[in-house]
């Protein structure tokens, strides 16, 4: 499902974009999607850092690697 948004820009900006054949709708959509994806990636990275900090020293990396290897061999 999609929603419609509107944005007010100076007339001269619209005229320049039209003169150069820029599809404003496609441009705005792409930029907003890219921004939303970056924000989600940043949030996930922050959450991962929090989990890493909480588990620091509580997980034996060698044991984890051994368990993963065993699981892959099955």
Image (cartoon, rainbow, N blue to C red):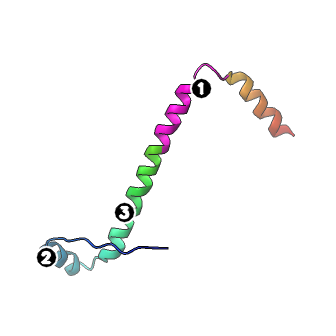
Please report the residue visible at 35 percent of the width from the left and 63 percent of the height from the top: 31
**Dominant SS type (magenta):** helix
Dot 1 and dot 3 residues touching (CB under 8 Å)? no
State the extent of the magenta-drawn residues as a range: 44-59
- The residue wearing badge 3 is 32
Position of residue 32 in the picture relative to residue 56 (left or right)? left
Please, what secondary structure does the residue beneath circle 2 have? helix
The residue drawn where x is 13% and y is 76% is 11
Tag 3, which secondary structure?
Answer: helix
Q: Secondary structure at mark 1?
A: helix
**What residue is shown at x 42% (from left), y 51% (from top)?**
38
- Residue 57 drawn at (x, y percent): 60, 19
Residue hosting label 2: 11
Mark 2 or mark 1: name the one nearer the start of the chain. Answer: 2
Left/right placement of residue 63 relative to residue 32 reads: right
Q: Residues within 10 Å of mark 2 (few under 14, many from 20)?
A: few
Label 2, label 1: how far apart the Cα atoms are: 54 Å
For discs 2 and 1, the disc positioned in front in the rendered view: 1
Image coordinates of residue 25 in percent, x first then y, are: 33, 75
Say if the magenta span includes residue 37. Answer: no
**Splitting the image into 4 quarters, where does residue 8 fall?**
bottom left
Within-10-Å neighbours for mark 1: few <14, some 14–19, many 20+: few
In whole angstroms, how far apart are the C-alphas of marks 2 and 3? 21 Å
From the image, which quarter does the C terminus lie in? top right
Q: Is residue 28 above or below residue 59?
A: below
Question: Residue 40: percent from the left, percent from the top?
Answer: 46, 50
The answer to which quarter of the image holds residue 66 is top right
């Amino acid at each position: 499902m999609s929603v419609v948004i509107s944005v007010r820009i100076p007339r001269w900006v619209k005229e320049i974009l039209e003169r150069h054949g820029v599809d404003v709708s496609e441009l705005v959509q792409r930029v907003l999607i890219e921004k939303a994806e970056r924000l989600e990636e940043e949030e996930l990275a922050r959450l991962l850092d929090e989990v890493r900090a909480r588990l620091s020293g509580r997980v034996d990396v060698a044991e984890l690697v051994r368990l993963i290897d065993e699981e892959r061999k099955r």
